Amino acid sequence: MDGASKSLFGRIRGRIPAVKLSDAPTVPSPPLPHLLTENKVPTEEERKIIREAIADTEARITRLVELEVAHGPPVDFDKFNLTRSRIIRRRQACEAFVKTHKSLLVPIRNLPTELLQEIFLHYAYSPTEYHRWVTLPFVLGQICSSWRKVAVNLPALWDKLPCFKIKRVITRRISYLAFVRELLRRSGDSATLQVYVYAPFKEFKTHPLIDVLVTHSERLKTLTIESTATTMTAFKGAKGRLTNLQRLDLYFWSHSLIQHTEDMDVFETAPKLENVSLYGKVPEAIALPWSQLTVFREKYDGASAAKVLQQASGLQTLEIVKNNHHAAPVPVPTTLSALKNVRIRIDDVSPEADVFLSTLVAPALDNLKIVYPESLVQHLTASFTSAAAQALDTGTIGMTNHLRSLAFRTTSISPEELRTMLRLVPWLKELDMEVSDGDDAFLHVFILPDTAVESVPIEPVAPLLETLSITAKTITGLEGTFNDIARTRCENATEPAGDADAIILSGSSFRPLRTLRLNLAGRENRYNSQAALNKWKAPASKVQFREVALLNAWRRQLLDELPEVFVEPFVKPKAPPNAEKDKSKEKEKIAKGKKLMRIFSDIELYQLQDSIPIRSSKLHLALSYIALRATPIRFPKYPRTTVEVAQRILDNQFKPILTGCLDEYKWVTKGTTSLVYVPSHADVRKSDNAIQDLVYELKDEMEVADVWWPQYL
């Protein structure tokens, strides 16, 4: 140390009060160290000891703080004051002691076993059919001995077995079979086993793992097999023992179309089996308890549907997807008085399919989704007429055509045919249709006459309709039609008081549409359609054109920097698996953040004039995507993250202008698939979140699979 440093150090030491380290309290030792390494619940006596230790340590902390304050405020030369540094370290250690021992008293360590079991079951629940190893609840038993005891002794936690990929060699090994037996032991003796066997295109006449599962045949509740007919016969030892099987899903994966005739009656005797799904080329010889089924699904050939429709008088849910033109025809059904839910897709026109659709008699039908290339409306009209006649003959008038939800796709729709069909289902609440190119005249069926101008009596079709969804590739040329539907069915409609349904059906009034939805693929298509429906003005002056060009340039720059944010469907990027990988990309991340900040700075310095250039450029939408989706980037020179700056620009520059033109947003974006009409009296227009909902995006309660449902049949 040179002379100047010694002199400076001496002056600082002279201002610091002399405090001996021996005056400072020490860090206490844990009174119950065994509780710090286990999750045991402390006894009442131990809880008393812990509270006393916490109180004593808090008193030590108070004394250490006093000694620390006695040295004055922290200065840059504290490193010369070893005593003060040691006092600080002791204080921090005491604080850690208090925090650790307080955690011993938290209620979660003393949860009742019943509550802990409910939490475990909620953790283990998986909505997916395909059960992976990661869903097994081993991790619950690795927290502590008490949790392990609860997990191991909770059979319901282990009854959903993992997917068994029996084509893997490991599944034949003794150690693996012992592991499976242990899982079965933990699942107890209850009849709730859910088993999934996976071996596409593989043929196993026998397999040791299947033999283990067969020994528990009486306990099977759900069984899914994805393999060949040969593999399914390996379960022959379960024949006559499936006393508790309730659901059976069979996927037939095979390169060969040779029909199997042997041992296809394994599942014929299963007294509780009510839910069956068949996929692929189903062997004609397969035997199932058809008469007792309440749920039946078949995809690919529809050949087994004949047995179900002829024998299952209690069938409630039917799904047939027939996309193989070589498959056997769907049969003519008998009356299915219990049928409530139907999903049908037939890709090829045939006389047999025509007859089937026209004679499907289901007077209690509540939900129907159907795809058929030609003349579908005529077939549905015949079916609904037969259902009404059957209900009249049997005196079940209350069941007549109570269809609530109808969704269909076909190539040609006549306005008069549609009107005739809808008159047969007056209780209809939801309707989902598609507009084909050049076939849109039927839309006028939903436009009501304006009684203020025309002296025409109102005779609305589907007077109880609440939701109308129209799917289209484009709405070019149909803007006026959709706006007329919105005006007459959303804006000008009022619902009668009292028993609205009865009043509406007895007179000429109707219920206003609560949802008028247009499903359009492609973000640009949706935005252009929104502009056309709302009749937004296009840029007209040179100033506006120049402003649009400038805003467009900024939008393209943002798109270049964050392309992942604008992809649909958007998937939030996962965090890097380790810190090293994150560090390697830190420079790239910082560079991107700086570019974004430069773009944001340019935007903030610009004075926006009106809404026309904003909407034309869609810069506000790009910023909203960044604010909602982008990963925040923070670096030393900037106090805010990139996401925070994007939101600030939206709030300070775009919000004041867009707030003044909310009335121009009649049709708004909903989710990533649709536009919906928002009436002038809608509550959302008065909400605090009106800007987000109307200008940017309404949250969609529907899943993508429900919007584009024909693709998922």
Image (spheres, helix red, strand yellow):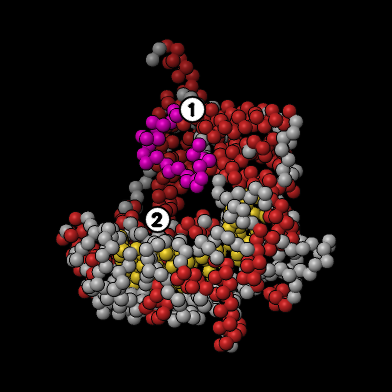
Q: Nearer the viewer, residue 441 or 273?
A: 441
Does 568 lie within the magenta span?
A: yes
Residue 79 higher or lower than 321, as above or below: above
Asked whether 363 or 617 is in front, the reply is 363
Q: Residues within 10 Å of mark 1 (few under 14, many from 20)?
A: few
Amino acid tagged 2: Leu
For the point 42% across and 11% down, the residue is 3
Disc 1, SS: helix
Q: Which element carries disc 2, helix, strand or loop?
A: loop
Check disc 1 and give the amino acid type. Answer: Ala
**How far across and how far down the image is residue 651, in percent?**
66, 40
Q: Looking at the picture, does residue 9 appear above or below residue 66?
A: above
Taking depth in this image into account, of 74 and 459 the one nearest to the observer is: 459
Pick whichever of labels 2 and 1 is earlier in the sequence. 2
Question: Label 1 belongs to which residue?
Answer: 591
Query: Taking the image as drawn, is residue 655 in sight?
Result: yes
Residue 535 location, x and y as percent?
72, 45
- Stretch in magenta: 563-588
Q: Quadrant of the N terminus?
A: top left
Q: Is residue 440 above or below residue 16?
A: below
